[in-house]
Image (cartoon, grey):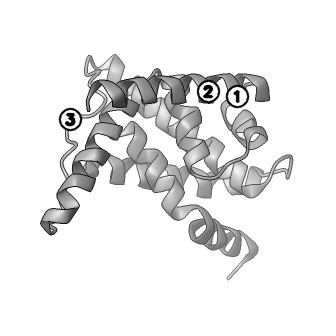
Amino acid sequence: MDAREQIFQQLIEDCGGGIARLAGSYARNRAEQEDLTQEIWLAIWRALPGFRGDSSLRTFAYRIAHNRSVTQLTRRRDSGDSALLDDLTDESPGPDMRLIQSRDAERLLRAVSQLSLGMRQALTLRFEGLSYSEISEVLGISESNVAVRLNRARERLNAKMRETE
């Protein structure tokens, strides 16, 4: 296994779940999420030889994921289909106790999907554990702008969640 393959495998182990969740924040359904996740990993694979080490590999991977996701969103809008999320149902069967959790998660997903793209991007990356400086690098904005976006996103989410109670 060459160095590129080792780095790629390490990225999959370290960021695989986070990349899938990031793709899910842009996708309308599970199939679109899976397609976007594959596109992201292909783009990361292709970009690895050009990695200069200006940032961490994690930031590099999330930056590519962000760019591919925005491209996907742009394509969808250009085709006249601007619905952000069509399917919010929980596909996994579970006991009655999970019903309440599922409804809360659905309310949260709806509230997040109603945020502006900038707020959604910052919030999703923060949920994945990226620092303000890493989010700043990924989105190409200042750290203070990241803080503002996250603060506004939290405020709007709190308000939307109170409205739906």
Q: Is residue 94 above or below residue 106?
A: below
Secondary structure, mark 2, is helix
Asked whether, in this view, residue 96 is left or right of residue 55, the answer is left
Residue 54 visible, this angle: yes
- The part of the image, by quadrant, that contains residue 110 is top left
Residue 67 on image: x %, y %: 57, 35
Query: Alpha-carbon distance for marks 2 and 3?
Result: 27 Å
Q: Nearer the viewer, residue 57 or 91?
A: 91
Q: Is residue 10 above or below residue 81?
A: below
Q: Amino acid at mark 1?
A: Ala
Q: Nearer the viewer, residue 148 or 122?
A: 148
Residue labelled with disc 3? 86
Q: Nearer the viewer, residue 21 or 50?
A: 21
The quadrant in which the C terminus is found is top left
Q: Are marks 1 and 2 in contact (CB under 8 Å)?
A: yes
Residue labelled with disc 1? 147
Residue 75 on image: x %, y %: 38, 26
Residue 89 is tagged as none
Number of marks in the rendered image: 3
Query: Alpha-carbon distance for marks 3 and 1?
Result: 30 Å
- First-in-chain label (3 vs 1): 3
User: Crowding near pointer 3: few (<14 within 10 Å), some, many (20+)?
Assistant: few
Q: Are marks 3 and 1 in contact (CB under 8 Å)?
A: no
Q: Amino acid at mark 2?
A: Asn
Residue 142 visible, this angle: no
Residue labelled with disc 2? 151
Secondary structure, mark 3, is loop
Residue drawn 42% across and 33% down?
Answer: 72
Secondary structure, mark 1, is helix
